[in-house]
Amino acid sequence: MTAGESMGDREGPDWWPLAEPFKIKVVERLRRTTREERAELIRRAGYNLFNLRSSDVYIDLLTDSGTSAMSDTQWAALMVGDEAYAGSRSFYRLKEAVEEVMGFPYVIPTHQGRAAENVLFTTLVKEGHIVPNNMHFDTTKAHVEHRGARALDLAGEWAYDPVADLPFKGDIDLELLDRALAEHGEAVPFVMITVTCNSGGGQPVSMANIRGAAEICRRRGVPLFLDAARFAENAYFIKLREPGYADVSIRDIVREMFSYADGCTVSGKKDALVNIGGFIALRDGDLYRRATVWAVLFEGFPTYGGLAGRDMEAMARGLEEVVDEDYLAYRIEQVAYLGRRLKEAGVPIIEPVGGHAVYLDALRFLPDLPREEFPGQALAVELYVEGGVRGVEIGTVLAGRDPETGENRYPRLEMVRLALPRRVYTCRHLDVVAETCQRVLDRRGEVVGLEFEEEPPVLRHFTARFRRVPRSAVGET
Ligand SMILES: *Cc1c(COP(=O)(O)O)cnc(C)c1O
């Protein structure tokens, strides 16, 4: 940051400079590459950023999942991990942390979030069921469908409007929820709310909305679960934006959020600040006992569930560190800071900025590229060539083809997601990201589109190879 400017100075007697609330004890060297090297590296990678080696990336914003920097106390915790097969001390540490932070007495550790979904959904979801959610995350949807059930997204219209400037765009539509429960009755095993709403850009869900959904669920006799990967980031938005919560502590907000739920699934790779891990937390002992049967089959004995004792130990500390208000202020403000820098540079982004990523609007960024030439992917490639920055396309490449017609599906938005790993990059790194975007914007007329060289039949974005469309071809087809 330059002098006189910080991520979020607050005026008045509470003024507090929101710089990183930590100092750096261990560093990881970043290799600098030249533009020529990067142009060659991305060409050899088939213009697909997933094919790059991380050592060839300068600032890696591919995902915030499993990429957090652990604290000194988390690293120290690894050493005291108890690797007992049954009854590990580290399991009890995790159980206590979950009960303290979230208020749930029963915990099943799993190796990551989707494994928690697998265990819980195998216990509760049957063929023909319908599972409502504000917006299912990919693996959550896949696990519902794997059980022969239907995943129903019930976020309101507002969640799909890229420019609607609303405080809680992740809210589930309570009217639609009530109607769905009335209509499908017994076929709904539970309702789920994802906090923050990942597939909706990390947008938060309000306390009033969670409370309202819980009331509807209780009236209809249906359990409510939270998909709580980013529960602490959600809590910070509630403190910041929801009337009545400015003076409530994050711990109390988190406790209230979970008080409305019967349990949750958690990917520890996000707000639990670890590189691998997850868990299910539950209020009901009977459901816990039913779920442990599947946990043993899929993950491991219920007191380790696919994790080493040291992993549970580190996750327990992560849960306590993530509800620290200084950390959350830094975290949410850092994402907002990148958003502000980009806006100042005239870079089109999706607003408001969510909790873990900034999304570039590729259609406004590269208005001259036809959608058949994948402007989102082309933009992600240019950011790498320009500054060694790796983001990810969230657009046509990701959306795949319609299985019936075989045609490309063109989603409403063509985006590049810049996801921020937790506690990893400084604001100066983010300045470089903003400068990189600005430099590409300044020469956007030169950016060329892409076409497939190799297109895998499923999940094509991970392994596809592209080539650049020759400039002369543009406009001729
Ligand atoms: C990441 C994530 C998952 C899946 O967790 P993994 O640890 O990647 O298996 C589920 N739901 C949400 C909202 C997520 O962000």
Image (cartoon, rainbow, N blue to C red):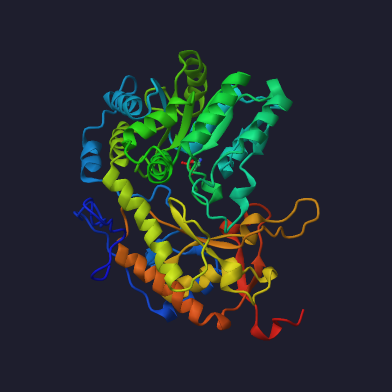
Please indicate whether residue 412 sits to the left or right of residue 228 in the image: right
Image quarter in which the C terminus is found: bottom right
Classify residue 188 by image quadrant: top right
Q: Residue drawn 55% across and 24% down? A: 215
Out of 455 and 364, give the one closest to the viewer. Answer: 364
Please indicate whether residue 168 sits to the left or right of residue 337 in the image: right
Please determine whether, in this image, residue 246 is positioned above or below residue 98. below
**Residue farthest top in this picture:** 286
Q: Residue drawn 66% across and 52% down? A: 458
**Residue farthest bottom in this picture:** 472
Q: Position of residue 84 (x, y in %)?
A: 30, 24
Classify residue 101 by image quadrant: top left
Classify residue 445 by image quadrant: bottom right
Out of 279 and 242, give the one closest to the viewer. Answer: 242
Q: Residue drawn 57% across and 79% down? A: 447
Answer whether residue 63 is visible to the viewer in this image.
no
**Residue farthest front in this picture:** 12
Q: Position of residue 351 (x, y in %)?
A: 51, 58
Please determine whether, in this image, residue 236 is positioned above or below residue 313. below
Please determine whether, in this image, residue 420 is positioned above or below residue 253. below
Answer whether residue 256 is visible to the viewer in this image.
yes
Out of 476 and 175, give the one closest to the viewer. Answer: 175
Q: How many marks?
A: 0
Q: Position of residue 35 (x, y in %)?
A: 42, 79
Q: Residue drawn 69% across and 81% down? A: 474
